Structures are given as structure tokens and as C-alpha cells.
Image (tube, helix red, strand yellow):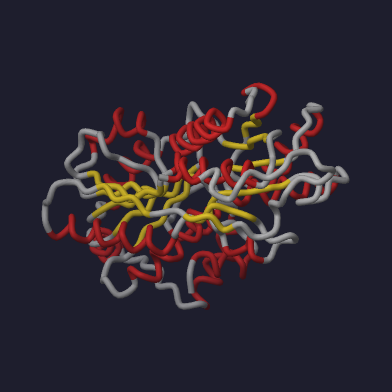
């Protein structure tokens, strides 16, 4: 039984459940009662003895999740939970908003919970530069590269976000698309978004495609609802496009709904590709084309590095997990004879 199972059973978000299980405020009495009852019935051991609770947290692993609606991180948490079960480390999972400061939150929780180590799911380099020196336990930043940050207790496991975005744009161009719009996060806040945007621009320049930052890019949070809103905003803007790249699968799925509501067929009128490789993409109509991040590899490598650093004090390590294209059904050649597809090897140069 995982926190996601409790979410499905009770109807409350994983963030709300996390706050209840970790005895945090800002939860209604009704929600707290329902969640605690469900947790007890499903076998969660909620410790009320202060001494026992202190001992548990002194051997625990803290996971700070940056983004309440980020389904990739939800999958990562589930994988981490499954893998850590046999390691003897109790797990503390804390969800924050995607625009909040993950490091200042970890500093606070390290004082309160005294974990052996911390996994950061998502992060901003500026936040680490400002506050991370207050954390002394081993940490691993997951999905973002911490190489170059001046901390001996910070390792990282990440995907190549620049390459992933380039692969998405390259795939659309290889199908014959030249009028491409992009939905992504706030570049001033999200390092992941910044890198994926860089990858987009590199691909557009390589293929000689004009891209207007004001007209062809719509900022959104990493959620279904925001993907829907962003796609609708692009349509209302009147910009003509035959393809859309969303910087996450949930954004892409929301965008497909908006396109269909507007009478656009996917992929006949607008091709759509996401980024993450979530399992839900196999069951959308059409199946979602995506650039896949390897969740299991990210979780396995992150825990391995953290466990190594807890037991020893080696130099920080920074690993990159490969990404791969999964073309599926939502991206296809544009209709009405707009542009002929490029040769199959036309985009290989940008993947090296």
C-alpha cells in the first residue's frame, strides 16, 4: 500500500495525504479523520509515542517533491517507496508547490525530522546556492543535474533535458512540420524548463525554423488543467500551427483535450508530443507520442547513490540517465500536403 493507493481510495491528493501522515497543518478535520482511518485500515503504522517517533526519524530518508501535480514525480515516489522497503529506512515524503523553495523546506524538515539523507525530486540551482550550505546530511537531486554546484554532500541523477527537447522537436520536423508551438513551465523558476527550452531553440535553429517566443510559447504549470488552458490560449491567439510540443506528458494530454474541443483532430490537424513517458500515455486516444525518461533507472540510481553516501563520505557523483523517443500515435505527417517529411536520417545529427 502506497501513498498513491491511499489517494485513490480516499479521493484526496497525495499532497494532502502526505501532510496528514507527517502531522502537518493546513488540512481540514474531516480530511484528516478520513485519511487517518483509511491509513489505519490499510496497515500504516502511525506512531504517537514521541520517543519512538524521534528514533524513527533519526534513521529516515526525506523526499522533497517539487510539484503537487507532477505525475512523473508521483511515479518516482512510488518506485522509491517500493525499493526502499527492504533497506530499513523509514520514508518521509513532503510535497511542495512547483514554484516553492525546495531547499529552504528541506532545511526546516532536517531540523525537525533529522533524516539520514534527502532526495530532492526537482530543484532550482539558485535555491541550492542560497540555502543548501545549511544542510549537512547526504543529498541527491533527482531529474536535475547538480554538477558544478559547490557542495560535497550533493550528488545528482538526471535526464538530459536539452537532448530530450531536441528529440521531440526533431521528431516533429522529421514528420514534415514547420509550424510548431511549445507549452512549458516558467523559465525563470524551473531549471528543467530552462534546459528544455534551450533544446527547443537549438532544434529550431538547426532546422531553420522561425520561433516567436511571444506567440509560439505558452507558460503553464505541469498539470492536465494547465496543459488544457495553455493550448486553448495558443488557439485563441490565432497563431497557425500544425504541431505542438508540451514539456510534460500531463501538459500534452490536457492540450489534446483542448484541441479536440476546438474541433482539431489529433494527429490529422495538429500533431502532439510530450515528454516523460508516463504509463497513462499508452491509454490516451490517440496514444501519446513522447520522449521517455526512465523512472525506474532514476529511482534505482538515486537510492544507490544516497545509500552509498550515507554509509561513506565519497566525492559527489553526477549521473545522466538516457532518454528515448516513443513515437506512438499522436504525432503524424501534416495533412493537406503542407510539407513533405524530411529523410529518416535528417535529425540524427542533433542526437549525438
Q: Quadrant of residue 105?
A: top left
Q: Quadrant of residue 4?
A: bottom right
Classify residue 351 as left or right of residue 177: left
Q: Residue at x 33, y 50 (%)?
A: 320
Image quarter (top left, top right, bottom left or bottom right) of the C terminus: top left
What percent of the width, then of the height, locates residue 217?
64, 30
Residue 65: in sight, yes or no?
Answer: yes
* Residue at the farthest right position: 263
Q: Quadrant of residue 233?
A: top right
* Residue at the farthest left position: 313
Residues 79 and 205: in front is 205
What percent of the width, then of the height, locates residue 97?
51, 41
Residue 69: in sight, yes or no?
Answer: no
Q: Compared to 25, does 217 lie above or below?
A: above
**Number of numbered tags placed on the structure image:** 0
Classify residue 112 as left or right of residue 205: left
What percent of the width, then of the height, locates residue 68?
54, 48
* Residue at the farthest front position: 343
Classify residue 65 as left or right of residue 86: right
Residues 53 and 97: in front is 97
Classify residue 261 as left or right of residue 126: right
Residues 110 and 350: in front is 350
Q: Compared to 119, does 240 lie above or below?
A: above
Q: Compared to 352, does 36 lie above or below?
A: below
Q: Residue at x 34, y 72 (%)?
A: 85
Residues 314 and 327: in front is 327
What percent of the width, then of the height, locates residue 348?
49, 46
Q: Residue at x 44, y 60 (%)?
A: 295
Q: Compared to 229, does 296 lie above or below?
A: below
Q: Residue at x 11, y 57 (%)?
A: 312
Amino acid at each position: 500500500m502506497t501513498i498513491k493507493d491511499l489517494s485513490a481510495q480516499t479521493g484526496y491528493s497525495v499532497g494532502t495525504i502526505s501532510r496528514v501522515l507527517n502531522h502537518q497543518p493546513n488540512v481540514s478535520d474531516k480530511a484528516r479523520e478520513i485519511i487517518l482511518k483509511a491509513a489505519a485500515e490499510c496497515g500504516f503504522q502511525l506512531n504517537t509515542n514521541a520517543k519512538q517517533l524521534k528514533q524513527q526519524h533519526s534513521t529516515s530518508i526525506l523526499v522533497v517533491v517539487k510539484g503537487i501535480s507532477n505525475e512523473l514525480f508521483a511515479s518516482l515516489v512510488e518506485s522509491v517507496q517500493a525499493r526502499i522497503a527492504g533497506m530499513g529506512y523509514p520514508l518521509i515524503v513532503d510535497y511542495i508547490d512547483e514554484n516553492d523553495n525546495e531547499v529552504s523546506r528541506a532545511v526546516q524538515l532536517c531540523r525537525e525530522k533529522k533524516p539520514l539523507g534527502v532526495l530532492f525530486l526537482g530543484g532550482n540551482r539558485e535555491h541550492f546556492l542560497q540555502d543548501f550550505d545549511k544542510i549537512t546530511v547526504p543529498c541527491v537531486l533527482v531529474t536535475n543535474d547538480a554538477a558544478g554546484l559547490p557542495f560535497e554532500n550533493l550528488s545528482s541523477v538526471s535526464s538530459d533535458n536539452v537532448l530530450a527537447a531536441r528529440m521531440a522537436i526533431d521528431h516533429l520536423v522529421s514528420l514534415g512540420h514547420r509550424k510548431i508551438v511549445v507549452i512549458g513551465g516558467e523559465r525563470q523558476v524551473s531549471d528543467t524548463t530552462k534546459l528544455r527550452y534551450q533544446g527547443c531553440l537549438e532544434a529550431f535553429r538547426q532546422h531553420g525554423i522561425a520561433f516567436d517566443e511571444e506567440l509560439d510559447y505558452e507558460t503553464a504549470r505541469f498539470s492536465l488543467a494547465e496543459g488544457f488552458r495553455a493550448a486553448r490560449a495558443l488557439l485563441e491567439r490565432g497563431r497557425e500551427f500544425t504541431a505542438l510540443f508540451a514539456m510534460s506528458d500531463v501538459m500534452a494530454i490536457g492540450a489534446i483535450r483542448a484541441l479536440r474541443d476546438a474541433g482539431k483532430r489529433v494527429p490529422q490537424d495538429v500533431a502532439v508530443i510530450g515528454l516523460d513517458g508516463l504509463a497513462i500515455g499508452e491509454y490516451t486516444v490517440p496514444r501519446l507520442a513522447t520522449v521517455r525518461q526512465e523512472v525506474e533507472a532514476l529511482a534505482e540510481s538515486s537510492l544507490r547513490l544516497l545509500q552509498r553516501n550515507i554509509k561513506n563520505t565519497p566525492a559527489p557523483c553526477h549521473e545522466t540517465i538516457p532518454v528515448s523517443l516513443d513515437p506512438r500515435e499522436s504525432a503524424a505527417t501534416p495533412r493537406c500536403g503542407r510539407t513533405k517529411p524530411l529523410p529518416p536520417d535528417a535529425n540524427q545529427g542533433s542526437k549525438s
